Image (cartoon, rainbow, N blue to C red):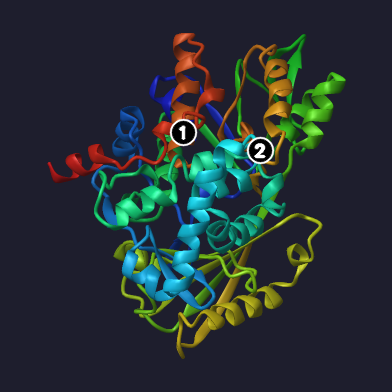
């Protein structure tokens, strides 16, 4: 939506075709039981001035800075994230904590003799945290999310989400040494008063207000081209529309297949890319002070849920005068997994049972449940995926008038700030005839997950 918004500001004729019934993609917001919720937890922060400037332009002053509280649930214990030494020692016990440190020191001592190149998520994490902490706090959650063994997952996931963080840095941070500002540990974030989707709803309204069109519930079947010069799109209902340029956020494999006549190596590369699905089970709980976290990570392998979001702890405008709370439990799967086709009632019962096991609700009753299924929500960074993209990207670059962006469209594990930046750059390329490399967005890991000082300063002004 960002690219359409920027193009509309420049008085360029724009049409948006959205397969869903609302804009925003994974960051959209919905109303449930008289309250607003997101499709999972979506905080916003960026150290890119262009992204912050646009976000503030759209949101204005209608946001709050939220103090983040996140914990990890593991073996009936709650661990603060980032690490708090007293809490960690109490939960682990001195013996387990000592074994974790010993495991870490062993890895550091043998790192020069290791033949593994660190290309897998498992080897990357073990090298920075030790084998014991990997098995406690990384293995189960990551395999729930991705559905593949950690040894088959590319280290890029760790490089994006954990960066250069290590147990040594965690201990320094916990004991008050070091600068205490590691980018993985952002503790404040900006959040719109009506949910993350407010940003994209406003962008869509602006596009319409200046004469652009936003078509909801209109999936695109394929991008049309003549001699690799894009000339429009074909909708699922068979209608064709002509355009000078197409910015695609369709899942990358679907978009590329629709181009037709693929070289054999490109076709095999496209077939090798996979996405993970998300099932969101929302529970209406008859209480308001359930637990203080915005979200928790569920690392216990005996529970299928991977994350729990408590929307009561974001901003008060989401729930208004309601005397209840909405929780969202996330489950991840592939199309062929049994849970994907389970009836809603079974999924809700599972979620009620699992949230009960955590003890988070104590005896507070659950009043109702609601299920949302999201296909292809996570591009799977299976080892070798970069080799597949390396064959696809040069092929796409031979097409004039075609830009692929976003988590789906570029097969990148984007946050909101990455996708906003992609949209800004895509619009700039079209308006100013630039050639900014969109494929490099979200690969500069040193600029990942910074706090948003620009937003805080503007807010205070």
Q: Position of residue 414 (x, y in %)?
A: 52, 39
Of residues 370 and 306, the one nearer the viewer is 306
For the C terminus, the quadrant is: top left
Q: Position of residue 276 (x, y in %)?
A: 68, 50
**Which dot, 1 or 2, sits closer to the camera?**
2
Mark 2 — residue? 116
* Left or right: 232, with 10 as reference point: right
| Residues at marks 1 and 2, CA–CA distance in whole angstroms | 22 Å
Q: Quadrant of residue 331?
A: bottom right
Residue 192 in view in this figure: no
Q: Quadrant for residue 330, please give it.
A: bottom right
Residue 304 to residue 366: above or below: above
Residue at x 74% of width, y 16% of height = 225
Label 1 belongs to which residue? 445
Callout 2: 10 Å neighbours few (<14), some, many (20+)? few
Q: Judging from the image, what secondary structure is the residue with disc 2 in?
A: loop
Q: Can residue 93 be spotted in the picture?
A: yes
Work out whether residue 229 or residue 436 is closer to the camera in this orientation and state it.
436
Please tell me whether mark 1 sits on a helix, a strand or a loop: helix
Residue at x-position 27% and y-position 57%: 175
**Residue 301, horizontal then vertical, whole percent:** 63, 69
Instruction: Give the x, y percent position of residue 33.
Output: 47, 72
Residue closest to the eye, 282 or 446 = 446
Give the vertical position of 379 relative to 132 (above or below): above
Q: Residues within 10 Å of mark 1 (few under 14, many from 20)?
A: some
Residue drawn at 66 percent across, 52 percent down: 146
């Amino acid at each position: 939506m960002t690219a359409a918004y920027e193009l509309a500001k420049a008085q360029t004729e724009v049409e948006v075709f959205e397969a869903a019934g609302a804009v925003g993609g994974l960051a959209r917001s919905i109303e449930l039981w008289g309250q607003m919720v997101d499709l999972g937890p979506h905080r916003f922060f960026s150290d890119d001035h262009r992204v912050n400037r646009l976000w503030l332009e759209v949101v204005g002053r209608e946001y709050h800075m939220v103090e983040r509280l996140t914990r990890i649930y593991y073996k009936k214990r709650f661990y603060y994230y980032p690490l708090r030494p007293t809490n960690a020692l109490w939960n682990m016990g001195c013996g387990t904590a000592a074994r974790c440190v010993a495991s870490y020191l062993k890895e550091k001592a043998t790192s020069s003799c290791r033949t593994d190149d660190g290309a897998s998520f498992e080897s990357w994490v073990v090298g920075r945290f030790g084998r014991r902490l990997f098995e406690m706090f990384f293995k189960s959650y990551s395999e729930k999310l991705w559905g593949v063994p950690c040894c088959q997952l590319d280290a890029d996931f760790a490089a994006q989400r954990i960066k250069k963080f290590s147990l040594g840095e965690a201990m320094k941070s916990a004991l008050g040494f070091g600068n205490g500002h590691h980018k993985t540990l952002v503790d404040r974030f900006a959040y719109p008063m009506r949910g993350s989707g407010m940003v994209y709803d406003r962008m869509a309204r602006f596009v319409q207000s200046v004469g652009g069109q936003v078509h909801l519930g209109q999936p695109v079947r394929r991008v049309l081209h003549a001699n690799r010069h894009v000339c429009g799109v074909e909708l699922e209902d068979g209608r064709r529309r002509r355009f000078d340029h197409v910015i695609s956020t369709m899942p990358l494999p679907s978009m590329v297949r629709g181009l037709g006549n693929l070289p054999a190596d490109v076709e095999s590369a496209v077939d090798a890319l996979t996405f993970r699905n998300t099932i969101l089970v929302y529970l209406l709980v008859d209480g308001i002070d359930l637990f203080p976290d915005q979200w928790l990570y569920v690392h216990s392998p005996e529970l299928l849920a991977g994350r729990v979001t408590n929307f009561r702890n974001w901003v008060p405008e989401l729930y208004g005068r309601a005397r209840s709370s909405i929780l969202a439990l996330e489950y991840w799967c592939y199309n062929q997994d049994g849970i994907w086709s389970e009836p809603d009632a079974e999924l809700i019962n599972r979620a009620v049972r699992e949230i009960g096991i955590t003890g988070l609700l104590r005896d507070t009753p659950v009043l109702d449940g609601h299920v949302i299924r999201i296909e292809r929500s996570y591009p799977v960074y299976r080892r070798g995926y970069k080799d597949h993209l390396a064959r696809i990207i040069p092929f796409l670059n031979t097409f004039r008038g075609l830009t692929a962006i976003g988590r789906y469209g570029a097969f990148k594990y984007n946050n909101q700030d990455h996708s906003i930046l992609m949209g800004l750059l895509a619009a700039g390329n079209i308006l100013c005839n630039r050639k900014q490399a969109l494929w490099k967005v979200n690969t500069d890991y040193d600029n990942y997950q910074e706090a948003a000082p620009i937003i805080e300063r503007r807010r205070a002004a």
